[in-house]
Amino acid sequence: MAAASVAGYESRQTLQNFSVGTMSAKDKLTIIQYIEETRPGPHLLPQNPKKRAQVRMICDLITSGIQPLQISMADICLVPQVYNAARFKVDMTPFPTIKKINDTLLEVEAFKASHPSCQPDTPPDLQS
């Protein structure tokens, strides 16, 4: 990904400083864990220690930067699903993030060329 895109991504990932009393943090998980441990329920973590550990492992995985800056298999799977949702008139307004990702991917030449409506065996009424 271009340096400008990486810089733009990083600038959107900053979190304002969170302060409660004398405690201050910028890390999302630190903030969530602090709230979990200092506020009455409902709790975000299960009471069972094994399940708590599993939730923490998943959170660590998600916040460790697994969201790539390059196109992934997930992106390749997303575009045809959104295409079919539109084809079957599914209301996608409740999913603005999916729409934004899909719109961005459709600007990539490989996605334009491989779009379902551009395939030689696409029925005429579905071609764009």
Image: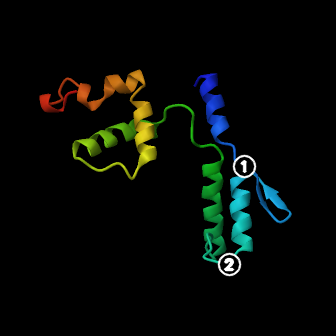
Residue at image position (57%, 41%) is 67
Which residue is at 45% across, 38% downward? 101
Q: Is residue 52 above or below residue 90?
A: below
Image quadrant where residue 50 sits: bottom right
Q: Which residue is mark 2?
A: 40
Residue 98: percent from the left, percent from the top?
Answer: 42, 44
Which residue in the rendered view is the most extreme toward the right?
A: 22
Give percent across and percent down for residue 68.
57, 37
Q: Quadrant of the C terminus?
A: top left
Observer-nearest residue: 61 or 16? Answer: 16
Classify mark 1: residues with Cα within 10 Å, few (<14), some (14-19) or many (20+): few
Where residue 17 sits: x, y (%)? 76, 52
Q: Quadrant of the N terminus?
A: top right
Residue linked to disc 1: 16
Closest to the camera, between mark 1 and mark 2, is 1
Q: Identity of the amino acid at label 1?
A: Gln
Which quarter of the figure has residue 55?
Answer: bottom right
Residue at x 69% of width, y 69% of height: 36
SS at mark 2 in the image? loop
